[in-house]
């Protein structure tokens, strides 16, 4: 990537998480943005580009700019679901490379838990009209259809799916702000209420409030930063479908396309990756993603979890914050993947909790999935 | 029931179900069947599409049973939702009208239009493309 104007993550932060009825989505994003900018050693007026995804405004970037009191000259409200923020990283890095912007603020906030906003009745228009009459609860029902097909094709058991939740919980136990920190067993996952066959309650992500922010900075400014910059090495994004009915193969996600594009851009191999942050809306999401990326052979991703490789101390650490399954999941979780990968690559946990720190972490793969396996975006980050 | 907003593209599909027919589109250029109804072929981008009546039979590609559902569907759970590969070459979501647990991937099914408890107004959008097991 020599000769390019490089981009790096200079600051990251979460807002308060869990149930936060005292915070609006705007207040959450203020909390996270102030903290992320402060960590970077930057001020509000350094921001010249704003990236915001959300469903709370017709244009979240315009609305948040007004609220923050800034007039950025580059605006992006791209919303491709939970993978939006990995896409924002790619878009912002491209704008930095092109010399259009210097400091990008990427933010998200959601009050979905306090709102109980999911699944309100509304008319079925356009392409929704062909699926909605059948009452499939979304998104879980779509992921259940994928899980059922995956189990049919590869003979993977419900217990193997549950291993993803069990491994991820072990990481959550090391994260002081994770919602669920009690030990978890495969039997407990399988004994939790059946939501949508074959997915049990503990195969499903949490429903929480929360926000996050990521500050991306052009290399000319790195010397001014208060943090060690984490470089964007590569990015890829794509979509395969909108409704689950139109997913070409229920066992192959867009990771099969966005992953190789990101890897090629970064010029790295799987052997170079030290830590993976993989969107875990459901246990099945993680298995399909790892296999679609090409990181595991079809039908074999569960081995990483059953054999303990993905858990703390393992050789392939996955979802080191406890994931959407146990840490937090405010609707569009992708920004939290970036936050955790950045902290791992800065070795932030070496001082606070060495058990959580991935030893000598140099390269992270971050992968967002949006909608009902509809969109994906892959980002490779590297310790500078 | 869900309020279906029937539009000019979808109206022939919904009207067919009122008389027990599964109406799909076919592309004049590439000859492939198309679902959902469109104004362009998603395979080849041609815009010359015509309607035909499919046999109404297919094979279950995937299936799930929601044990909890929302809104008007809450009291219907558990029920069977499937993706069906229709023999003419399109995939549809459907409700399979059978006992939960009795339908597996690979099972053969046929069209069984049903209002799923909603009012049978005789209007397009009031009867849905449900399926039932064959045999």
Image (tube, grey):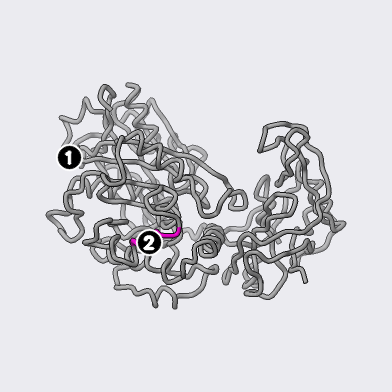
> How far is mark 1 from mark 2, CA to CA?
30 Å
Q: Where is mark 2, residue-wise?
A: A19
Q: In this view, does B95 lie to the left or right of A100?
A: right
Q: Is residue A114 visible?
A: no
**Splitting the image into 4 quarters, where does residue A38 fall?**
top left
**Splitting the image into 4 quarters, where does residue B66 fall?**
bottom right
Q: Is residue A1 visible?
A: yes
Q: Is residue A305 left or right of residue A349?
A: right
Marks 1 & 2 on one chain: yes
Say if A247 sits above or below A177 in the image.
above
Q: Which residue lies furthest to the left in this view?
A: A351
Q: Where is mark 1, residue-wise?
A: A227
**Magenta stretch, residue numbers:** A299-304
**Splitting the image into 4 quarters, where does residue A286 fall?**
bottom left
Q: Chain ID for label 1?
A: A
Q: Nearer the viewer, residue A384 or A335?
A: A384
User: x and y percent of residue A107 in the render?
Assistant: 36, 42
């Amino acid at each position: 990537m020599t000769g390019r104007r490089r981009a790096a993550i200079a600051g990251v932060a979460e807002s308060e998480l869990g149930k936060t009825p005292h915070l609006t989505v705007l207040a959450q994003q203020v909390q996270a943005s102030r903290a992320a900018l402060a960590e970077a050693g930057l001020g509000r007026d350094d921001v010249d580009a704003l990236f915001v995804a959300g469903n709370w405004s017709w244009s979240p970037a315009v609305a948040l700019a007004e609220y923050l009191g800034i007039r950025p000259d580059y605006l992006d409200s791209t919303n491709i679901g939970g993978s939006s923020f990995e896409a924002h990283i790619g878009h912002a890095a491209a704008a930095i490379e092109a010399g259009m912007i210097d400091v990008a603020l990427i933010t998200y906030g959601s009050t979905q838990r306090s709102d109980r906003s999911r699944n309100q009745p509304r008319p079925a228009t356009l392409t929704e009209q062909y699926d909605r009459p059948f009452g499939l609860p979304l998104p879980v029902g779509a992921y259940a259809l994928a899980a059922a097909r995956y189990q049919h094709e590869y003979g993977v058991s419900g217990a193997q799916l549950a291993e993803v939740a069990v491994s991820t919980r072990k990481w959550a136990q090391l994260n002081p702000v994770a919602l669920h920190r009690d030990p978890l067993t495969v039997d407990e996952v399988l004994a939790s209420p059946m939501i949508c066959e074959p997915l049990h309650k503990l195969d499903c992500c949490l429903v929480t409030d929360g926000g996050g922010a990521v500050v991306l900075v052009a290399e000319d400014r790195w010397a001014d930063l208060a943090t060690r910059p984490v470089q964007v090495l590569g990015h890829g994004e794509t979509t395969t479908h909108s409704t689950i009915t139109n997913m070409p193969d229920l066992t192959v996600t867009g990771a099969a396309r966005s992953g190789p594009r990101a890897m090629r851009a970064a010029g790295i191999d799987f052997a170079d990756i030290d830590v993976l942050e993989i969107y875990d809306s459901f246990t099945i999401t993680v298995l399909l993603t790892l296999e679609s990326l090409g990181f595991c052979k079809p039908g074999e991703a569960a081995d990483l979890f059953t054999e303990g490789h993905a858990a703390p101390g393992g050789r392939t650490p996955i979802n080191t914050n406890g994931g959407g399954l146990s840490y937090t999941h405010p609707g569009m979780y992708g920004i939290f993947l970036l936050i955790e990968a950045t902290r791992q690559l800065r070795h932030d946990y070496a001082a606070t909790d060495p058990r959580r720190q991935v030893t000598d972490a140099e390269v992270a793969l971050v992968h967002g999935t949006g909608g009902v396996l509809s969109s994906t975006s892959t980002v490779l980050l590297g310790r500078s | 029931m869900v309020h279906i907003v029937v539009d000019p593209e979808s109206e022939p599909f919904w009207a067919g179900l009122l008389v027990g027919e599964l109406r799909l589109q076919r592309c004049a250029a590439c000859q492939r069947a198309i679902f959902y109804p469109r104004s362009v072929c998603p395979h080849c981008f041609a815009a010359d599409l015509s309607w035909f009546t499919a046999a109404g039979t297919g094979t279950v590609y995937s299936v799930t049973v929601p044990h909890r559902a929302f809104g008007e569907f809450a009291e219907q759970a558990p029920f069977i939702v499937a993706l069906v590969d229709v023999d003419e070459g399109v995939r549809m979501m459907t409700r399979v009208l059978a006992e939960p647990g009795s339908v597996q991937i690979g099972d053969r099914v046929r069209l069984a239009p049903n209002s799923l408890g909603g009012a049978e107004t005789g209007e397009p959008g009031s009867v849905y493309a449900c399926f039932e097991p064959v045999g």
